[in-house]
Structure formats: C-alpha cells, structure tokens
Image (spheres, rainbow, N blue to C red):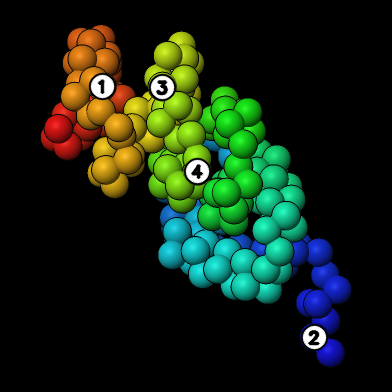
Amino acid sequence: MDSTQDEHPARIIRKEFFAYRNGIVADKLRNAGDPHPIIMGCLLVDLLDTTRRMREQIGNKERLALLAQELWNDTNSRECRLAAPMLYPHELMTMPLAAQWCQSVETIEISDNLCHKLLRHMAGAEELMAQLIRNHLPLVKYTGYRLMLNLLMTGQIQSPASIKPLVEAERASATGNLLTLLKDIEEEF
C-alpha cells in the first residue's frame, strides 16, 4: 500500500513543492521583493504538474475546493497561493469567495495566476471584473483589469466597446504595472 494514500493532500503537495524547489529562482523572487516568507522558487510548469496529479488523485470537486481553500489560506507560502487557483473547480467558485480572494492578493504574480487559472473560467467573471476595477486598492484594481484582459482575449466580454472608455480614463493616472497592463488591454481592442 502506498504510504501517501493516508497522508493529507496539502502535506503531499507541500512535499512536492520542496522537491521542485529552485534556490536561484527563490533568491531572485526574494530580492525582487516577494513578500512571502516561504518561497520554494517552483516554476509554474511544476506547479501545474503537481496540481494536475492532485486533481486526478482526489477527483471530488468539493474536496478539491476544500484543499484549494486550505492552500489559499496559507499566505506565507508563494507556492500554496499559486497552486490554489489551479486546484479550485471554477464551477464551485462563488462571487463572494472570488471577491474575498481578490482582496487578499499580495503580488502581481498571484493576481495574474488567479485570473488566468480560475477567475476567467467562473460564471459571473465579467461582473466580478467590473466590481474589482472600481476598487481603490491598487492590487485589487490591477486584478480587475488583469481579469478584463483575460476575458477580452477569450472573447468573453459582452460589449468590448463599452469598456474602452474605462481603460482610457484609468490610463490617464495609471503607473507601473497597471499602466503596462492597460496598454496590453488597449492592444486587444
């Protein structure tokens, strides 16, 4: 019998993060200001592989949602925060929970991954996007516009012309990562 069968899935995932650790990437992330105390430096491709295997092993969507929430709640670990959106079944993600996750985003990397791996697939993504871009917190606002880009690229925005004025108005005062993102969105029009 496989000894990992009785082991808690979050513990199994953390062991895999440790196996995939990359000190060079971790050091670069720390030096660039990543706020997570625990950074393994795992590459996204490795996280995708780990979460794919875990989805296959668990199978049950409710159990996957619980595991993903447990990982998301571990704000100390970069890898846990990145893996959670890869595991959470999009059809189970609610608007209130999605908004809560967006409020707790701590880096651009986490935001980009959250939008790409989870939020763009959930019902009500355009409504969530509209809510987020009105937020005053910079990373929440960025997450809203990042979701907008994801939805534009996949043709999921009902009326793309209606959001162009929003992007143009935001661009007038935007700086840094948000400005770059807004330019990317304008290229999609």
- Real-space Cα distance between discs 1 and 4? 20 Å
Q: Percent from the top left, x then y, of residue 48? A: 49, 64
Instruction: Estimate how packed mark 1 is, as few (under 14), some (14 to 19) or many (20 or more) residues with alpha carbons within 10 Å.
Output: some
Residue 163: give its label: 1
Say what secondary structure mark 3 lies in.
Answer: helix
Tag 4, which secondary structure?
loop
Quadrant in the picture for residue 101 = top right
Residue in the foreground of this view, choosing between 32 and 182: 182
Q: State the image coordinates of residue 95 (x, y, percent, origin top left).
A: 58, 31
**Closer mark to the observer between disc 1 and disc 2:** 1
- The residue type indicated by label 2 comes to Asp
Per the image, the residue denoted by label 2 is: 2
Q: Earlier in the sequence, mark 2 or mark 3?
A: 2
Location of residue 88 in the rendering, given as x and y in whole percent from the top left corner: 60, 51
Identify residue for label 4: 122
| Image depth: mark 4 or mark 2 in front | 4
Q: Residue at x 59, y 53 (%)?
A: 89
